[in-house]
Image (cartoon, rainbow, N blue to C red):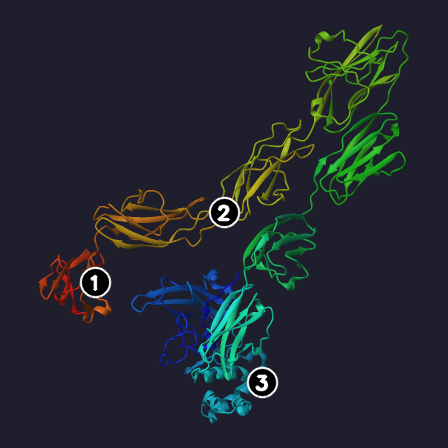
Amino acid sequence: ASAEAAPAPAASESPAPPVESSQNTEAASAGAQPEEPPDLIGLFVTRPQDGEVTVGGNITFTAKVAGESLLKKPSVKWFKGKWMDLGSKVGQHIQLHDSYDRNKKVYTFEMEIIEANMTFAGGYRCEVTTKDKFDSSSFNLTVNEAPIAGDLDIRAAFRRTSLAGGRRMTSVFPSSEGHEEGGEFNFSALLKKSSFLRSVNRGEAKSESQPDVDVWEILRKAPPSEYEKIAFQYGITDLRGMLKRLKRIKKEEKKSTAFLKKLDPAYQVDKGQKIKLMVELANPDADVKWLKNGQEIQVSGRYIFEAIGNKRILTINHCSLADDAAYECVVGEEKNFTELFVKEPPILITRPLEDQMVMVGERVEFECEVSEEGATVKWEKDGIELTREETFKYRFKKDGTKQYLIINESTKEDSGHYTVKTNGGVSVAELIVQEKKLEVYQSIADLTVKARDQAVFKCEVSDENVKGIWLKNGKEVVPDERIKISHIGRIHKLTIEDVTPGDEADYSFIPQGFAYNLSAKLQFLEVKIDFVPREEPPKIHLDCLGQSPDTIVVVAGNKLRLDVPISGDPTPTVIWQKINKKSGLVQSNDDSITPSENSGDLNTDSKLLFESEGRVRVEMHEDHCVFIIEGAEKEDEGVYRVIVKNPVGEDKADITVKVIDVPDPPEAPKISNIGEDYCTVQWQPPKYDGGQPVLGYILERKKKKSYRWMRLNFDLLKELTYEAKRMIEGVVYEMRIYAVNSIGMSRPSPASQPFMPIAPPSEPTHFTVEDVSDSTVALKWRPPERIGAGGLDGYIVEYCKDGSTEWIPALPGLTERTSALIKDLVTGDKLHFRIKAINLAGESGAAIIKEPVTVQEILQRPKIWLPRHLRQTLVKKVGETINIVIPFQGKPRPKITWMKDGQTLDSKDVGIRNSNTDTILFIRKAELHHSGAYEVTLQIENMTDKVSVKMQIIGK
């Protein structure tokens, strides 16, 4: 696809037009000069000109555009440098204004720079675009330091000036389009103070002894061989720039004989598109040469030359930034110049930054993807740009379309919002850097074990990289063949095989670098076997055979091993039974199901199970039995009854097993009270707390389109509500919650409903009364300065009678317009009016008209605005249609009277139509008797205004 760029005249190809800038008293201004003719090339009537201002001063640049041939208002953009659009910089230092002169049909556009500083100096450009035309004009701004009283103005002595159009203009920058513009530079910053003084003294002496000379006139008349001599004689240090201007002046002195149609002064094309440059020649057989920046262009795949009759066309395919240059078409001795501007498409951010949370000292890597490989991006932290000077702290990396910002060792001060910017997009992410904290997900528990058994102490901490030591009665445990120490991920284990009485002690685990001490006791269970006579009744030897059953607590997922010493002769039969409605196990030493004779006090749903293998099982030994649950689950909770009996008798004991676990996940949190960068999160406790009290909650947040959750709190939240802050307006977020008890952290809750932080807009601006009648008030306003991500749904207009506090809606519902006509008001009432902007987040503040408005027609004197073409005799031919429109003003609506030659008009012969703002005389077919003097009179009370229109009808 090709993009035929609209032609546009460039400032560099035409003589310098008159300066259209107004400055305050602090701005340097030139003396009054005679007005120059307007620019007749392109869209501009008057182009903005180079200006000079002192630091702290104000300056206004003005561009005027002809509007007579335009159907609608043209689009005007102001740029600094090549592509920095100043429309987004409007504020304290830059204001943009526009107006339209209906009489002259001229649009006026102004850029006002307020309280200028040194950074404002440079090249600027004004760009005008209509439906089918484009025009561009460049200009420079010089900013001078404020002079100090008594000091010598050294810069003024070294500033070189040129004479163009009878005015002295100073420029310190080359053209923003990349070609040199006149070559005036300020070299004062390159010289030392001592050489300043010597040069100034020489300059003063020279100015006293030599009169002013017109260097331009001397160069125009001199042969080229004398140029260098003249430059040395008159102190011209940039001869090349002056010769370039001189070349253009000489070119304009003679009319073109070789070209019937020249190149337009400037063209614009998007990068990657193609452009055609065309001229028409007086001699169809003439040869042409095309040059780029003074070098002849050779035919290639990108450059195509065409000759069609007397037309010569240069086509440039796939335009790149290298094609942004000055071009010329040469026929014999004649040259035709133009400028080509290549505009880069905006670079978009295809994958945004992700929020990150790290601990102090960890590496941080922000990553995003852009639409173009090797693109230039800008990184900021909390609104401050990160530059290459800070490479010791930050490292920037590009990998194809990916862009990286790397912080090798993060500190608390690195927390904040990081922004990556391109000329086509912005992405923001938050970095939270926390001091290292260690959480204990599972502590070690007390153990009671029997000789030759295995003892395992286990704990789980939040950081899998944390190491630690195990202590026995305060002394470090040294591993050997019987004692093993392991560290896998976040779990630390101390395993003791073949436990002996010497292993009974206090054991502790201390994480390195943290003030934690996790302790538990190992109790050695010594089995005492007393001499029993034969035919001894069975006996269960437990420490807690009282009225209440013993309670064994086990953490879900851990192994439960319950050793029950027994005695009896002959060897008793052992029955295990769970006496709740879930399930039961029974294991007899002869592997047979033995019905319980005591089943009368058991629940009828109880079952006897006999498993010697599997997750829940029973092991039988000569002097004890073992009840084992591998990987305890919540369903394993309950009361377990062990019954031993032999022919002599029986014994029984109840043991309560309690399984504790992490809590169930809470339900999805609810989001409320959403603001610009905050919201309130509420949730309910989990339905099951895991058998242990809930200690608190952990809240996480993520962007809707992201997969990374970021933790919002390090200390557990004790309440059921939390105010989340530091979010980005207009970004969709989700929240989820974890419950935490002494065992650990639950699974996450379902994500909340997606929500977007938004804020109401600011109040509307420029709220004024446009018109008042006896029963209506016309109001107008402008949109709010800040609308925000919530957009704008409309406006609500209200009024209140003077002395009352009740505000009444003036319109039904919202209005999307920026004006309103309030009808059916009572004449004479004094009313206060206010307006509010509305969006999803609610109402803005109110904009109020300070003084009450009296509902009463405003008396305006009648005034007729007679069009210019009716001020002389209107000549029409017989049979032509006549339509005379005469606008007027006046309130209330004036009485309108038409007369012809002193007589009232015949309404059958001539049509009259009146409105509030104009009166129309209409004749369908003109006849000779319609000639004469027509007079229209306006009357309001005792005030009148009248005009006459002379009409002459002639034969065909």
Mark 3 element type: helix
The residue at 67%/35% (across/down) is 745
Q: In this view of the protein, can residue 157 be seen by the observer?
A: no
Q: Residue at x 64, y 53 (%)?
A: 367
Quarter of the figure with the C terminus: bottom left
Check disc 3 and report the residue beneath it. 195
Between the C-alphas of marks 1 and 3, the distance is: 80 Å
Amino acid, disc 2: Glu
The numbered mark at residue 894 is none
In three-dimensional space, the C-alpha distance between marks 2 and 1, rounded to whole angstroms, equals 63 Å
Q: Which residue is mark 2?
A: 676
Query: Foreground residue, 334 or 124?
Result: 334
Picture quadrant where residue 442 is located = top right
Residue 874 image point, x, y percent: 19, 69
Q: Position of residue 816 (x, y in %)?
A: 37, 48
Q: Secondary structure at mark 2?
A: loop
Residue in front for this viewpoint, 749 or 423: 423
**Which sits earlier in the primary sequence, circle 2 or circle 1?**
2
Q: CA distance from mark 2 to mark 3?
A: 59 Å
Q: Which image quadrant for residue 214?
A: bottom left
Q: Which residue is mark 1?
A: 881
Between 234 and 240, the one lying in front of the other is 240
